Image (cartoon, helix red, strand yellow):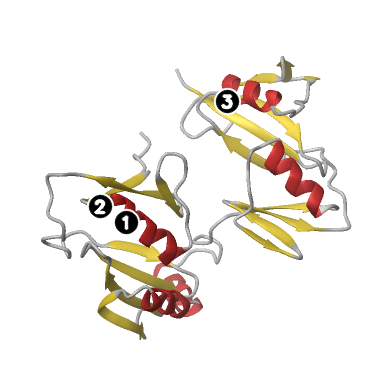
Amino acid sequence: MNSPAIGSILLASTDPGRLRAWYEKAFEAEADGDGFLRLGGVGLLIDGRDDIAATAAEPARVIINLHVGDASATARRLDALGATWVAALEYREPAGAWFATFADPDGNHVQIIELTPAYWAARRKRLGGPVLAAASVTTRLPAQDLERARRFYAEKLGLEPLETRPGGLRYEGFAVFRSAGKPSGEHTQMGWHVPDLAATVAELRERGVEFEEYDLPGLRTAGGIAEVAGNYPSAGGFGERAAWFRDSEGNLHGIGQTLRG
């Protein structure tokens, strides 16, 4: 049985617009079309309710932990927004991490945490295991023409970069970097997982994405979609329904939908 995943946290407020705008400024995030602030893998939804007090009655009962790359820079930004500090920023030697707790405008307690290399070294020593066991995974795709790649991802896939630098574009979960090399396109370089593959393929085709067709032993597409059953790893299912396309730089992308019994 697969464990359930925490997808979002609902933070109730009597003035959700004000509180949402504050969080957007504090953490340089922007609410998506559904109103979620995508902070890592968990969405924060600030929603209005009329059955709560204007200020959190027991703010320490539930504390949101936000992991940040630079706790000092985050603390300075929070200072500029007038955050009330419950516990000032401090480095805790045994933990190898920076911690600080503040109260948001509604009185909710939020803790910012920066895990340093010392933390990960101590964790490996304590728990054992290979050096990459606790590492996060990201995909990096080469692009000979960065502006061309940006246009493809924006116009064809509807994706805008979170950060732009001369050497590349950073998106949610992956990056495109400037490179003189050219990908072979002979294997899937990045995979996407969706709940409805047919609808996804149809929408992307409307945006101009062209899907690959295959007729190989064990892999045959029909209308750009293949049934890949058997022992294919597929997030708890018994296979996947899959489709493939290339971006403007020749990188091969796969889109999969889990097949379940």
Q: Which residue is mark 1?
A: 18
Asked whether the residues under the numbered discs 2 and 1 touch, taking CB atoms below 8 Å apart as contact, a structural biologist would say yes
Structural crowding at the residue carrying mark 3, measured as other residues with C-alpha within 10 Å and reported as few (<14), some (14–19) or many (≥20) = many
Mark 2 or mark 3: whose residue is earlier in sequence: 2
- Provide the secondary structure element on which disc 2 rests: loop
Residue 71 sits above or below residue 208 on the image: below
Would you call the spot at circle 1 few (<14 residues within 10 Å), some (14-19), or many (20 or more)? Answer: few
Residue 148 percent across, percent down from the top left: 81, 47
Residue behind mark 2: 15
Pointer 2 local density, CA inside 10 Å: few below 14, some 14–19, many at least 20: some
| Dot 3 or dot 1, earlier in sequence | 1
Residue at 57% x, 55% y is 137
Query: In terms of depth relative to the viewer, which is nearer, 211 or 216?
Result: 211
Q: Tell me, yes or no, whether the two marked residues, 3 and 1, touch with CB atoms within 8 Å.
A: no
Secondary element at tag 1: helix
216 to the left or right of 206: right
Q: Nearer the viewer, mark 2 or mark 3?
A: 2
Q: Residue at x 85, y 43 (%)?
A: 184
Residue 246, given in percent of the width and then of the height, sits at 77, 36
Read off the residue under disc 3: 240
For marks 3 and 1, give the one nearer the viewer. Answer: 1
Is 239 situated left or right of 178 in this image? Answer: left
Q: Tell me the quarter of the image containing the N terminus.
A: top left
Amino acid bearing label 3: Glu
Identify which residue, 144 or 139, lies in the foreground.
144
Instruction: In the rendered structure, find residue 119 and report the number of the disc placed on it.
Output: none
Of the pair 56 and 63, the residue shown nearer to us:
56
Please tell me which residue is depicted at 28% across the width and 66% down the height of the picture.
104
Please, what is the three-letter code of the amino acid marked with disc 1?
Arg
